[in-house]
Amino acid sequence: MSAALEAHVVVDRGGFRLDATLEVAAGEIVAVMGPSGAGKSTLLGALAGLVRPTSGRIRVGDRTVDEPGARRAHVPPMRRGVVLLGQEPRLFPHLTAAQNVAFSLRARGIGRAQARAEASAWLDRVRLAELGTARPAALSGGQQQRVALARALAAAPSIVLLDEPLTSLDAETAADVRTLLVAELAASGTTAVLVTHDAVDAVALAARLVVLEDGRVTQVGATRDVLSVPATRFAAALAGLDRLEGVASGGAFVHDVSGLVLQADDAASVAAAAVDGTPLVAVLPPSAVRIDAADGATADAGAGSDAWRARVVRLEATVGGVRVVTTPVDADGRSAGAQPGPRVDAASVSAEVPVAAMAELALAPGDRVVLRIDRRHVRLLRR
Ligand SMILES: Nc1ncnc2c1ncn2[C@@H]1O[C@H](COP(=O)(O)OP(=O)(O)OP(=O)(O)O)[C@@H](O)[C@H]1O
């Protein structure tokens, strides 16, 4: 596939610098995820032509649309074949739903009658056929966002930029619009870059995922690969996985901060840990971590390589229960390397506990526990 978008975007904004490279193949949907303030909106703004890059180059198809320093180097937003669909629908309030969509078509030079017919067909596709004559104020948030989607796609852009288009919608409406997005983007073969905070959206919509942190791309790959083998703590958190950094020792993983030892059985993990001293990352799913009160019958099991002692740091509600965030401790109950602040997180392991089991365990922050994980769920990777 040829590249629909090739961009190296550098933007300086006060103390913040975005320096990111992004390539998207024709017809591909790429998701961009990153912590708040990472520069995701700035990146989309630059691609859309709304934010002027400091340096770099943006190419849409075979056209250069931005190249600071070059002659005629900035193509304005309306003329670069890129549309941005944001959190807010931003419809023209004085136009009806059908007129909003027709506006895009007219802007492409399509005649009035044909634009009206095509707008009506687009509204049908986003299941708003009956609401063509309604003005935005009379539509719900989800309906407005569907009109905005129809208007964006009716413009037949080379690239659609989606900046968290579902965040302002309630869960049910978001699910509805997500389904429409998947269907319409696939049907029109539109190339898209989707900024989202929701890993579900990334998995549902995008084959590829770019992780942006502090203005830099920290990982890029197939969405499922990034989420199953996250390179950074942020990416691991996205996937709901624990990620620990350590070194190989005697074929096992030894955690840098706590000395916790983990083993893994699969061939790739065994190979990664083969040479002592190799820097490793251990990735483990909290759902596979078993937790017991340290004063229970299993308290002595803490010494084995697949079980360890820990202290509860905090409890977080999840959809199905409670996520217990812990930090490893030594046999005397001292937190190994877990000072207050970020280091606690650097050493933390979470266990996911169903509500019913949580009631039985009656855990609170500060409690000592024994954690255990089946080594089949541990993955070791070189870092
Ligand atoms: N108009 C602006 N002028 C100056 N700095 C800005 C402007 N907009 C954003 N910034 C700064 O640029 C950095 C990146 O912001 P940006 O909005 O791109 O991040 P983001 O990843 O989209 O965050 P969020 O997920 O919270 O929307 C931040 O430090 C922000 O303060």
Image (spheres, rainbow, N blue to C red):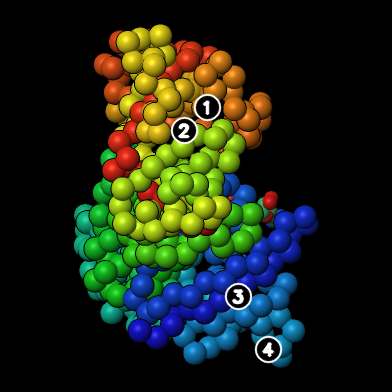
Q: Are marks 2 and 1 in contact (CB under 8 Å)?
A: yes
Residue 327's tag is 1
> Which of these two is toward me, 228 or 206?
228
First in sequence, mark 4 or 1: give its number: 4
**Residue on which disc 3 sits:** 8
User: At 44% across and 53% down in the image, what residue appears?
Assistant: 273
Residue 229's tag is none
Q: Amino acid at mark 1?
A: Thr
Distance from the alpha carbon under mark 1 to that under mark 3: 40 Å
Q: Amino acid at mark 4?
A: Arg
First in sequence, mark 4 or 2: give its number: 4
First in sequence, mark 1 or 3: give its number: 3
User: Label 1 neighbourhood size at 10 Å, few (<14), some (14-19), many (20+)?
Assistant: many
Residue 236 to residue 71: above or below? above
Name the front one of labels 4 and 2.
2
Q: Are marks 4 and 1 in contact (CB under 8 Å)?
A: no
User: At 58% across and 82% down in the image, what residue appears?
Assistant: 65
Q: Amino acid at mark 3?
A: His
User: Label 2 neighbourhood size at 10 Å, few (<14), some (14-19), many (20+)?
Assistant: many
Q: Secondary structure at mark 3?
A: strand
Q: Amino acid at mark 2?
A: Val
Distance from the alpha carbon under mark 3 to that under mark 4: 18 Å
Distance from the alpha carbon under mark 2 to that under mark 1: 6 Å
Whether residue 33 can be seen here:
no
> Which of these two is toward me, 64 or 122?
64
Distance from the alpha carbon under mark 3 to that under mark 2: 37 Å
First in sequence, mark 2 or 1: give its number: 1
**Residue on which disc 2 sits:** 349
Q: Quadrant of residue 332?
A: top right
Distance from the alpha carbon under mark 4 to that under mark 2: 53 Å
Furthest-front residue in view?
A: 250
**Residue on which disc 4 sits:** 72
